[in-house]
Structure formats: C-alpha cells, structure tokens
Image (spheres, grey):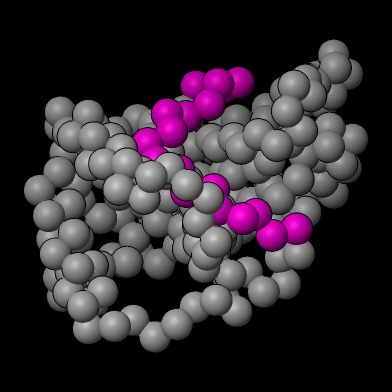
Amino acid sequence: MERHAFAMQIKEGRMNDYRRKLGRIWPELTAFLDVARIRNFSIWNAEDLIFGYYEKDRNKELDQQSQTTKEKLISQLGDTFTWLSVPGEDMRLMYYNYGVVRENKEMIRHRVFVTKLKDGCAEEYKARHDDLIRQRGDQVDPGPDSNFTIWSAGGYIFGYNEIDTSMETEETPEAREATIAWEKRQLEIMDWITNDVDWITGSVHASVKRLGWHN
C-alpha cells in the first residue's frame, strides 16, 4: 500500500466557492476513487489551506481514462486555489510511524495538524524527526498511533495521524512534561496554523475541519 498527500491554498475569498464546488463534484469524485482503487481518501481544511491524504495499491497506475477524469475533476475546482504541492508528485515526507494499519476504521480517531516552517528550517525539522525514528529503532509501533505521516510543501507542514482509541491511555505527568518540552523546542523552527498547542502557548489558532472522506 502506498500513501500519498497533496496540498492547496485557497484564493482570497474563495473558500465558500471551493466547498460548494467540492460538494457538487463529490459523487463523481468518489466514483473515480472507486474505479482507481484509491482508499481512505480525506480532505482537510485549516484557515485557507487544504490538505488531502489517500492510499492506493503499490504500482497501481491510473489508466488514460482515469487520468482524464482526474484532470477534469480538478479543473472544476481550479479557479478557487493554487497548488502548494506539485500536481502528480508526492509532497516531501518528513516523518513516518506506520505502525499497525487498522483495516477497520471504526475505532480510529484522526489528528491532522498544520504548521508553517520558519525560513531555512526545513532541514532542521526533518533532522529532528529522523532522530525520533532512530530512537524507536524504526520498528513497527503497535499503537495507539497506527498510521502517522508528516508531509511538507510550500513551506508548510501537514501532519496526518490515525489513532486507535482502544489503545489510548491517560497521559502520565512525565509524558506531559516531555510533550511540552518538545513543542516549545519546535517553536524555534515553526509557527502553528492549527490549535494543537494553544494549551501550552495560550494563543488562539484555527481548528482543523474534515471537508470530506471516502473509504
């Protein structure tokens, strides 16, 4: 299974148009996803940013008809946004913790977040997260994180995490302190778009919204 992501920035004053047009094409879009065998497709929004995530079979490429359908669908939204990612190419993968991917999503909750990298800090961000992978030995994580990836495009960071709620436990004081220390250190290299650490900083940021999902 392959994981893919894309990102867009909505043009000023066009968010309502984007959402209306997305709703209009949604039946045709989901029919395309089924034909193309694209699964776990979701679109998320924070402020004027759009982040999309999906999965497909490895080495399963679109045929010409499906490619034409995809381009047609995108064109129907095209006057409402500009691309942050490169169309047809993956965003840069900054971190992964694939864990055990649950086929049944009924007990899964999502955490999706967005930040803006400070100038020149992309490599430091990647290095810090590469170190997290080394610390866990790049082993399969039994959970509760089951499908965690962080992507980057256009100077932004987009995180996608599926969390098995049946494995979640109360955070210990030690873990909470470690989280606070990590997040404060991350503020050296990025600024938050979503409200994930408002409880630490006292700031007020946007909540992330899921605009659509298709399995």
- Magenta span: chief secondary structure: loop
Q: Is residue 205 visible?
A: yes
Q: Residue at x 43, y 50 (%)?
A: 159
Quadrant the N terminus occupies: top right
Residue depicted at 55% across the width and 37% down the height: 5
Q: Is residue 96 magenta?
A: yes
Query: Front-most of 203 and 183?
Result: 183
Q: What is the x, y in percent for residue 104?
A: 76, 64
Image x and y of residue 31, in percent: 88, 42
Q: Which residues are magenta?
A: 86-103
Examine the image and state in which quarter residue 202 appears. Answer: bottom left
State the residue at coordinates (37%, 36%).
94
Horizontal side, residue 114 vs residue 192: left or right: right
Residue 100 in the magenta stretch? The answer is yes
Q: Choose top left, top right, bottom left or bottom right for residue 65.
A: top right
Residue 213 horizontal/vertical position (percent) = 69, 56
